Image (spheres, rainbow, N blue to C red):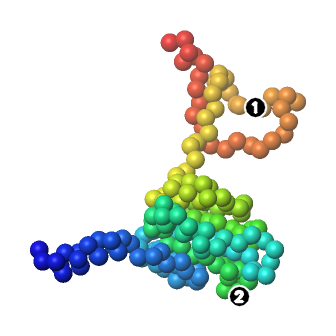
Amino acid sequence: MNAPVALLCLAAALAGGPSEQTIHTDYGTAWKEAQARHLPLLVVLNPSPDSTGTRVENELLTRSQHRRDLLANYVVAVIDTSTEKGERVWKQFGSAPLPRVSVIDKNQKLQIHRASAPLVAEDWNLLLEKHRAGLYVPPPPAVVSGPIVSGTIRPLVGTYPAGPQLTGPFVMQSAANCFT
């Protein structure tokens, strides 16, 4: 290989790698791109620049190479809620305290993560690592164990404080199984 071609290949290798992550400021554009690319959508809803609230700055998201690599698995939208469009998006997300961070699954159907607490660097890394596949994983069904009594199941009146009613599906285990 001649020297100019070798230098060109070396320069391409050194400059290679993915282009910089696009951070959208328009939710609709980000949503359409996430749908087209079949990627999860990371949405950050920021308070007004004039507010005293904490903002998630783009520099925080892209500070380390590791985080930039994780962000390559997402379409990212950072929305300023002080604008008219930003305020509408914030209302769509339930007007939760700001800043609000949500991850929408790769089918753009469900929020698989949502939080309003400030995140430190390690929290961001864990969040991005956990949801990068963009899949919703439902919680496991409730498991109720103990003896099975024939007849209607009734709570012990006066023994337990009133609380939420359990709803199925339940896996019932009989004490008789312990003796076999």
Check the image and name the residue furthest to the front: 3
Question: Where residue 140 appears, x then y in whole percent?
Answer: 56, 43
Residue occupying image coordinates x 74% and y 43%: 165
Amino acid under label 1? Arg
Image coordinates of residue 172 in percent, x first then y, are 59, 30
User: Do we see residue 11 in this rendering?
Assistant: yes
The crowd level at tag 2 (other Cα within 10 Å; few <14, some 14-19, many 20+) is few
Task: Please give the residue where the numbered disc 1 appears in the rendered image.
Answer: 154
> Would residue 25 appear left or right of 73 to someone viewing this image?
right
Please, what secondary structure does the residue beneath circle 1 have?
A: loop
How many angstroms separate mark 1 from mark 2 (CA)? 53 Å
- Residue located beneath label 2 in the image: 84
Residue appearing at x 60%, y 18% in the figure: 175
Q: Is residue 153 left or right of residue 36?
A: right
Q: What residue is rendered at 68% in x and 27% in y?
A: 151
Specify the farthest residue to the left: 1
The residue at the point 75 percent across, 80 percent down is 48
Amino acid type for the residue under numbered disc 2: Glu
